[in-house]
Image (cartoon, helix red, strand yellow):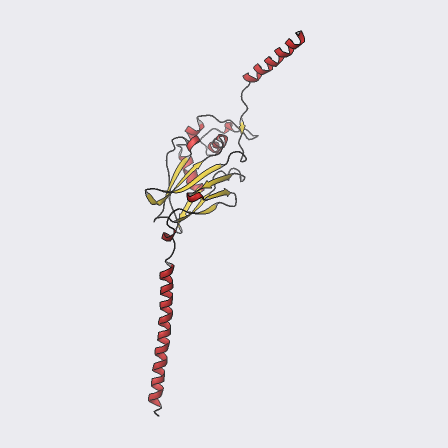
Amino acid sequence: MHHFGRRLAAILLLVAVGALLPARPAAAHPFGDPQTVTVALDPARPEVVRIRWKVGGLDDLTLLGVALGVLPEDRVLLDGAVFYQASDAGAVGPSAQLAAYLLKQITVTGAGEACPGTVLAPKDLAREGVTVDYACPAPVGRAAVAVRTLTDLNPAYQTLATGPGGQHAVYRDGEVTHDWVLGDVAADEPDLGRSAAVQIGGVALGVLLVVIVLVVAVRRRGTTHPT
């Protein structure tokens, strides 16, 4: 019994010491929870493509904040360990550096034209992410969206993306662009019926001109050589 009491005391001592030791920092890496992106049209503005980006792991948010110069460099150790703090999202979210980064790494093209973006101030960057509105010159039926976030830090990062009607895509290094159907595709497509009609009309006109030339030539030959 006395021996058992000593063992129990040793175990309790180890537990107490472990509780007093500082928590180990998380290691930021691209193999944890992936980033997510949702792609949709603004319900009130059919020319605006709305994209919501959300980081996967909070340690990745800290890593990005350090890379952007918003957070101090000593938050990331040489072995890749990251010291995440609850205040990180509040520092990175409203920063001009994050806004510029997102506008560079996420781009939208509608009807062959680049759509300028506006980053909306995030209310809760860690939980809700951040929304970016891309204003295109006309209502969007189909849009090409490119996502390169975090792959500049490590090419192994990936992004899971979803869109209307159950559309989905995975963005990764080397596969950064995906076409999304967001509205009336006919708005982006040429009027094929009208185009075909124009082509047929052009062919008919050409045939008619050939017939006229032949008739004139026959008549002239008949006038020159009367029977």
Residue in the picture at 36% in, 71% down: 204
Q: Judge whether 213 appears above or below 193 on screen.
A: below
Question: Whole-percent x and y of residue 135?
Answer: 35, 44
Question: Whole-percent x and y of residue 133?
Answer: 37, 41
Compared across the picture, whether 41 is left or right of 60 comes to left
The quadrant in which the C terminus is found is: bottom left
Residue in the picture at 36% in, 65% down: 198
Question: Whole-percent x and y of residue 76?
Answer: 52, 29
69 or 60: which is nearer to us? 60
81 or 216: which is nearer to us? 216
- Can I make out residue 127 in this image? yes
Furthest toward the front, the residue is 165
Question: Whole-percent x and y of residue 148?
Answer: 48, 41
Furthest toward the top, the residue is 2
- Can I make out residue 92 in this image? no
Furthest toward the bottom, the residue is 227
69 or 61: which is nearer to us? 61
Q: Judge whether 200 appears above or below 78 on screen.
A: below
Residue in the picture at 43% in, 29% down: 89
Q: How many numbered tags mark residues here?
A: 0
The quadrant in which the N terminus is found is: top right
